[in-house]
Amino acid sequence: MSSDLPSPPGDGPDLTDADYDYAADDVAEPGLVADLEDLVDGDVRFDTYSKQLYATDASAYRRTPIGVVLPRHTDDVAAVMSYCAAEGIPVLPRGGGTSLAGQTVNEAVVLDFTRYMDGIHEVDPDAREATVDAGAVVEAVNEAAAPHGLKFGPDPAWRDKSAVGGAIGNNSTGSHSLKYGKTDAYVEEVEVVLADGSVETFGEVAVETMRAEADPDGELLERIYAELVRIVDEEADAVTERYPDMKRNVSGYNLDVLVDEARGEWADQGIGAGGTGEPGTVNLARLLCGSEGTLGIVTEATVSLVEVPETKAVALLTYDSLNEAMDDVAPILEHDPAAVEVMDDTLLDLARQTTEFGDVVGLLPDGTDSVLLVEFYAEDDDEGREKVADLVADRCPGTDTVVEPTADRVDTDEPIRARAAMEAHDADERATFWKMRKSGLPILLGRTSDAKHISFIEDCAVPPEHLSEYVEGFQELLEEVGTFASFYAHAGPGVLHVRPLVDTKSLEGMEQLERIAEGATDLVVEYGGSVSGEHGDGRARTQWNRKLYGDDLWNVFRDLKAAFDPDWLLNPGNVCGDHSLTEHLRFDPEYAFDAGFDPELHWDNENGFRGMAELCHGCGGCRGGQSTTGGVMCPTFRAADEEIQSTRGRANLLRGAMSGELPADPFSEEFADEVLDLCIGCKGCKRNCPSGVDMAKLKAEVAHERHEREGASLRDRLFANINLVSRVGSALAPLSNWATKLPGSGVVAEKALGIAAERDLPAFRRTTLRDWYEARGGSAVSEADADRIAVLVPDTYTNYNHPEAGKAAVRVLEAAGVRVELADVEDTGRPAHSMGFLDTARERTAAAVDDLAPRVDEGRDVVVVEPSEAVMLQSDLLDFHDTAAAAAVAANSYGVLEYVDAFRLDEAMDLAGDGSLTYHGHCHQKATKKDHHAVGVLRRAGYAVDPLDSTCCGMAGSFGYEAEHYSMSTAIASILYDQVDASPGETVVAPGASCRSQLGDREGAGEEPPHPVEKLAAALA
Ligand SMILES: Cc1cc2nc3c(=O)[nH]c(=O)nc-3n(C[C@H](O)[C@H](O)[C@H](O)COP(=O)(O)OP(=O)(O)OC[C@H]3O[C@@H](n4cnc5c(N)ncnc54)[C@H](O)[C@@H]3O)c2cc1C
Ligand code: SF4
Ligand code: SF4
């Protein structure tokens, strides 16, 4: 053993975090910032907000960085590294920050590659390679490769939010690792900045070349070569002996790959494994895989690509116990599946509770405890069906299959354990099974209690033949410490995700944490497994590497680290440093939270407002792009590409300000401007965040308290009282409209009120919907003739600005035999709510309940044309009023096409829609899962409809009219405009008034698009 470093902890003198002598106080930040600003073209951010934003990732840890640099090119990275090397300052490269073990939080200068260094330089279909920047999103690489029928092999679940540099750092992989292996099998070459700031290209190199250039006393690269040659010469047998004999191991450094390559054994490792296969040649790019930013900083990578499989087929096998399912994994693997995923009873129960998957889980036989989802890749559909039939014939004989099993099928001769089998072949059915497999986790992660399902031993791996004993031992361990966990995910390669419920804010929880981690490590060591089969070492698992690999290999790791990074400046503490499981947790017994006010709204979750403010677990799901991730969340991140504009950024800053981590007053003007102001309240996070973080509701509370303390601007009050303003505007129309069109009126509006000069305010209509309705003598359907009676709310926008949509609603409903009465109430409280005037909103919602509840009591339904107002009555109302009357109104309120769909009213209409429509739904209706109704109705009416998977339009009520928000609003709109341009629909339709206004500003749009109910009315024969 050649280590000159101090002995490992416990055997000798204590090690520091690493062997650097940096401490935050030693760095004169102003000088540091000025120096870095001089050195780099990118952004240098050392303010407290930026540091708080990068203090957490998707793990349970928190560590404030020294500062953040957003490099623009390799020279920036090299400049930062050389400067920091000279000053002894640690550096941490970061991608999407979606790591689960804490490897992207450190006291270091963080380099965020995702802002500027995210380009895809080349996809070469002939060489089947892509050359990309380290910050390129993995799924964006897939998008670029898709036209050639290619993709990046590994499929980490969060590939649409994480970067290639991060995949290299963690050696990432996913559900189909049985076929594709890990990232290391695909990284051919990297450009890397080493610890002294030098830039090198790492790829294939002969061991003899390294030997010739090696010099233990020479330059950095010569010292690295010397250590690598020594490991190949002296440690190869120890590596082979001590590394777990399984592909899913990402703990420690990739020394097994190094020695296998040197022996010429690597190319046999599985699909995708590149390399020459020649003994004596290694690929140093692969050595960086799984090194967690501790050996070098990747700036660019060339990765190999694989063919997208022709077709897939899925079988779902059900079991009476988790152990039986686990015992069945090894024989199933003999059928050569691409994936074998497990779901245990806890997750099945949670999936059963969801409206989306309750029905599917209901199809499983009574008593089903666990299921295995088995996926096959196939050349064509027939082969896929045969593979499923062969599997079922072997593992669940007697079950009918779509085709007969083949004559030469695999017969494992193992006891039969599965109780039933289902199969899925078309894309939608397969997607349903996969979504079901993933559906329970968000519920686990949605706990707002102090105890949370945290990740710290969530990806231990054991050889599949030991899964059953491992699970049994793990369950006993959990019982012993008095908690529980669900077991799910990648059973095929032996990686089970386990997130025990632990409250790290309590001392008991901290003790549980340690006991579980230690016990789980003992179990994986006993069964020849790994403490990390997927997510890496980070802060949670580094300390267990010594137990896993033993002192000798632990010291080899440290020698390797010292050779690459003599001063231990690259992400120090990880892999073989002194990070400890229990230090620097985000929530620990010292953590305290004080919101500083009494919330106005009902919070029916555990821990109320605090529970919601602490809910974001940092997964980075809100950083996904429109084309890669889809959905609504988070439009402001999509427009700005800035962490602070993501839901995660806002949640981290809000929690930080209220827990004292961030020295900021959450009710100050600065905090409002920097953090919450640009949240457009679209509720995308409430819908798409796996934990259901409701930033719009959090923002409403904080804005209200701010109004209470600081007062509110005239503009905010005007928008909150838009109903009153509209009433006056309509009474004075057309004069009021001319006034806004006068030359210079926009400038005046901007100066006096802060309304964007570029915007045309919606025109007021002299004849309102109510005027029209009264003039026609009320409903054309008498009470006696009516099949149903609807109370139509003439909401502000429909009544005063867009009565034609309201008239269309009346026509449509009457055509279905519905009597339409108008509500007295016009203002549902939505405008006041979205401007943060919660007491005003409370009064208005109370008035709405007073008006509508008695009518609902009489059997009438409430119908609203404007989606945000409909959602106000359907759900936000209950945040104000916990009464039976409010609940009755909420349960009986509908958006207009939701109403048509819910009662199949269109079946009573004679409809002949013609043409094609592009449908942009309203984000509030998407958040409440009400958006599909309109599409169904329009299709049945005869239209071809292309529903856009769009985010918010960016107008968001009054947001887009506000001068300081105009640029954000139009940046968000441009995402929608691109989708509309790409859609085949002839006519755009959108139920939201502000969406229509925004879409009307699209170049070439001509005029504002119609409400979908207008197209339905137009289809009436
Ligand atoms: C919900 C969820 C599901 C997940 N599913 C999977 C899964 O299926 N499979 C899986 O493997 N992982 C999974 N992960 C973990 C994580 O998403 C992946 O490991 C991902 O590839 C990390 O990418 P990132 O861009 O977020 O990297 P980061 O988290 O930013 O960084 C990861 C590591 O790489 C280092 N690094 C980043 N950039 C560079 C660079 N340029 N040079 C050198 N080192 C660098 C960092 O220092 C860090 O140590 C999941 C995470 C979440 C939250
Ligand atoms: S807000 Fe939700 S999606 Fe975003 S990081 Fe937090 S938990 Fe993940
Ligand atoms: S409400 Fe919309 S804009 Fe605000 S954080 Fe959530 S997704 Fe982003």
Image (tube, helix red, strand yellow):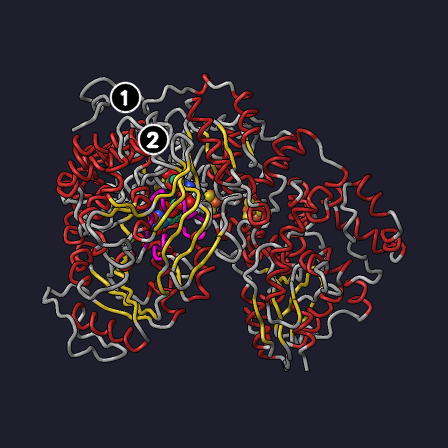
Toward the viewer: 396 or 169? 169
| SS for dot 1 | loop
Q: Is residue 447 left or right of residue 377?
A: right
Q: CA distance from mark 1 to mark 2?
A: 23 Å
| Residue receiving disc 2 | 220
Residue beneath disc 1: 15
- The residue sitting at 25% across, 71% down in the picture is 388
Give the quarter of the figure containing the N terminus: top left
Q: Quadrant of ligand 1?
A: top left
The boundaries of the magenta stretch are 153-174
Q: Position of residue 731 (x, y in %)?
A: 86, 55
Determine the secondary structure under disc 2: helix
Is residue 177 shown left or right of residue 960? left
10 Å crowding of disc 2: few (<14), some (14-19), many (20+): many
Is there any visible trace of residue 512 in the rendered image?
A: no
Q: Residue furthest front?
A: 212
Q: Main secondary structure of the magenta part?
A: loop
Q: Is residue 159 magenta?
A: yes
Decide: few, some or many residues near mark 1? Use Cα within 10 Å; few <14, some 14-19, many ≥20: some
For the point 79% across and 42% down, the residue is 750
Amino acid at circle 1: Leu
Residue 568 counted in the magenta span: no
The picture places residue 972, in percent across and down from the top left corner, at 62, 52
